[in-house]
Amino acid sequence: MERRVTFYEETSFKTTEIGEIPADWEAVKLGELANIQIGRTPARKEKESWENGSFPWVSISDMKPFGTITETKEKISNYALEKYFKNVSRAGTLLMSFKLTIGRTSILAIDAVHNEAIVSIYPIGSIDKMYLLYYLPTIDFSKYFDKAVKGNTLNKDKMLVIPIAIPPVEEQKAIAYVLSAVQEAREKTEKVIEAAKELKKSLMKHLFTYGPVSLEEAECINLKETEIGLIPESWEVAKLGEVASVTSGGPAPQGEEYFTGGSFPFVRVQHIDNTNSRIERYDLITEQAVLDYGLRLFPKGTIVLPKSGASIFLEKRAMLPVDSFIVSHLCAINSNNNNLLQVYLYYVLQQTRLAANKADNYPTLNLSEIRQAILPLPPLPVQQRIAEILQTVDEKIQAEEKKKQALDNLFNSMLHMLMSGKLRVKFRTGEEEESG
């Protein structure tokens, strides 16, 4: 049965070493609330500790914030387990990182051990483990850093005296319940996004091989072998430079005066988002910057991709969201052929691999190489249908990404408000359920 909660604003606070907290909360040292166990790293030189390892060994990279650990990248042998670890952290144990990345928390879903940058936390008394999962990352740990050690780090003694704001135990559970519900919704949305992206990959492979036909119809499509693999017999192939203009941007303006009061969009490589291949931000430059640097304006919808640096291998492709100037490290591509739709070109370039040269370990693409890229060129109605199908998937991904961002914002806001006591929460009683 789904539990229900009631929210209300707190009006009565008291001052503690943590700061202001609700009058009925307590500030209690972590050492009074939980026992702590620090992990270890078996000697890397001991091959017998790591070869054929089968027992999970947790590092910080295995910890997803507020998440569960079901798998670890590395495993240790029974030899290392017996030699280095007196105790095993059982499934359900709360873990927290306390070196380098400070305050990341996760719950073990498996029996495991962990390294010395992580502690197992075992609550004692009336403290809810899930409440600690969400509360601990909100602490400003910088007050407790060991200044004598290079890098951000805590030690066990300092951890034990860190004060924790403790609500009544039922409120602890209600806080954890609310935050876990938002987190669960966020994780479900992430899975939808991942599934939609995988669907897009499969669709692109199918569409650029058989066209916009069903799996059953694909068996009847006559294919031909080309430089880029199999495509329908009715399609053609063309070099990118034969059907589109391929140019590049200009130098980035240097000097604050070229940006102060600027109103003209200027797009750099880093403005192309790594995860969604969209441009959602850009610099603004002045008219004087445009004149002094002789910059060229590219129209909205121009396809841009990096032509130098490590970003080449991220295969970023994006369309300018507005008329923009672009940096010289970006290539600008626009269809100049009546038989090639710009939106189709955008999608076909997403699955076109460009081989980069490496000069002094710095990868580059020159414009002549980019112009040599071979593209499948179906009839215009087919291009249109392929673009429509992929746009529909992209719209679904974008909608889910916006939903995830809204849930991220809600989670962060609720985390702050609930852990500060400014917003209180409790489970609804039977009387409250009946009345409303």
Image (cartoon, helix red, strand yellow):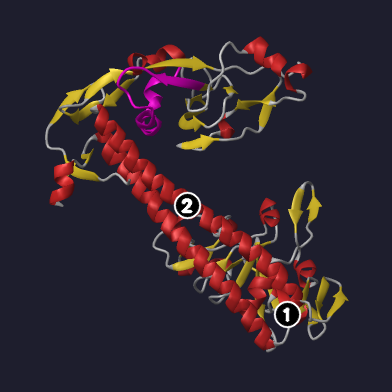
Q: Which residue is label 2 attached to?
A: 188
Whole-percent x, y for residue 130 in the image: 38, 31
Q: Is residue 191 visible?
A: yes
- Is the residue under label 2 in contact with that under label 1 (CB below 8 Å)? no
Give, as a single range, the part of the protein colored magenta.
Answer: 119-146
Q: Residue at x 37, y 50 (%)?
A: 409
Q: Amino acid at mark 2?
A: Lys
Residue 386 as seen in the image, left or right of residue 412? right
Q: How busy is the neighbourhood of tag 2: few (under 14 within 10 Å), some, or many (20 plus)?
A: few
Q: Residue at x 27, y 40 (%)?
A: 417
Depicted 156 relative to depicted 327: above or below: above
Residue 174 as seen in the image, left or right of residue 269? left
Q: How busy is the neighbourhood of tag 1: few (under 14 within 10 Å), some, or many (20 plus)?
A: few
Q: Amino acid at mark 1?
A: Glu
Residue 144 colored in magenta in the image: yes
Badge nearest the viewer, 1 or 2? 1
Whole-percent x, y for residue 229 in the image: 83, 70
How far apart marks 1 and 2 lie (CA) works out to 34 Å
Depicted 256 relative to depicted 208: above or below: above
Whole-percent x, y for residue 365 in the image: 75, 61
